[in-house]
Amino acid sequence: MRIDAHQHFWKYNEVRDSWITDDMAVIQKNFLPEDFKPLLPLNNLDGSVVVQSDQSKEENIFQLANGLQHNFIKGVIGWVDLEAEDVSDHLAHYQEFKKMKGFRHVLQGEKQRDYMLRPNFKRGIGKLKEYGYTYDILIYTDQLKYTIEFVRAFPEQPFVLDHMAKPLIKDKQIDSWKKEIEILAEFENVYCKVSGMVTEADWKNWTRDDFTPYLDVVANSFGTKRLLFGSDWPVCLVAASYQQVFELVRDYFSKYSKDEQELIFGTNAVRFYNL
């Protein structure tokens, strides 16, 4: 099964979705399953994992309903208040929904840059494995040093790093990011999504060569058994089409064996998220 391990749906709300700024006007509208579904067969993909874009119970209801209605949605990554005293009750509730595979918090947006080290947040993370849930790590590069400390505390918890921690591709900064990615990758329970690159580049003037050094780092650090392809559609549309995003990753890994390519484009996602 070939999988896009990271995409989104939303009914656009200018207040709730204020993160979609005016320079991202191309995505200031609804993006729903019927818009996305035709893109999968065009790229020989069988399904996708839809990831939360709002931190609310309503978001979970919306995405799980999409999952019930559309078989191509193989998994949902929702949101739960990990700091809530009754977090176990919420996790137990979501056991009813077979497509709920894990959770994510928008750590990149927190003013407290080491938010993931808060005791109550870590307490919530410590509950996830009991219920079979994964955790998507959404951070900026300045949070990598805290994330290393964070994952060290949970050697048995399945983690996946979203968007390669958003390296500063536009500014061609790589050294400190590379060092910290290499340390993070030493934890074998941490996977990495090959996703989100185009939005970190020069939206109007990127070239394929811009991404090669960063792809080299994650490929060498995580290896082909812990990388997952993700499009980050429709966010990617601010800088590239779905086809361009897919081809960037496909072409880079074309020098790898067929078996290794299948790992990155599906097998790893199926295993990690238990699809």
Image (tube, grey):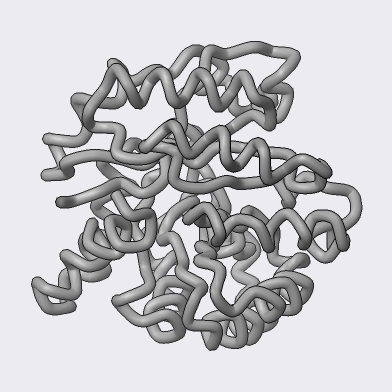
Name the side, left or right, on which 102 lies relative to 70.
Answer: right
Residue 202 image position (x, y, % from top left): 55, 50
Residue pictured at 38% horizontal, 20% vertical: 66
For residue 264, what is the image quadrant? Answer: bottom left
Q: How many marks?
A: 0
Residue 234 against residue 163 in the figure, above or below: above
Residue 26 visible in rendering? no
Q: Residue furthest right?
A: 112
Q: Nearer the viewer, residue 46 or 86?
A: 86
Q: Which residue is pictured at 53% across the width and 20% down the height?
A: 61
Left or right placement of residue 216 versus residue 149 in this view: left
> Image point 54% across, 63% down: which residue?
161
**Residue 175 x, y percent position in the rendering:** 64, 83
Residue 225 location, x and y as percent? 31, 76
Q: Is residue 83 left or right of residue 44?
A: right
Which residue is more in the foreground, 8 or 62? 62
Residue 146 position (above or below residue 40): below
In front of the other: 195 or 67: 67
Relative to residue 85, is residue 221 drawn left or right?
left
The x and y percentages for residue 151 are 66, 74
- At horizontal 67% and vertical 22% (from top left) the residue drawn is 17
Q: Is residue 48 visible?
A: yes
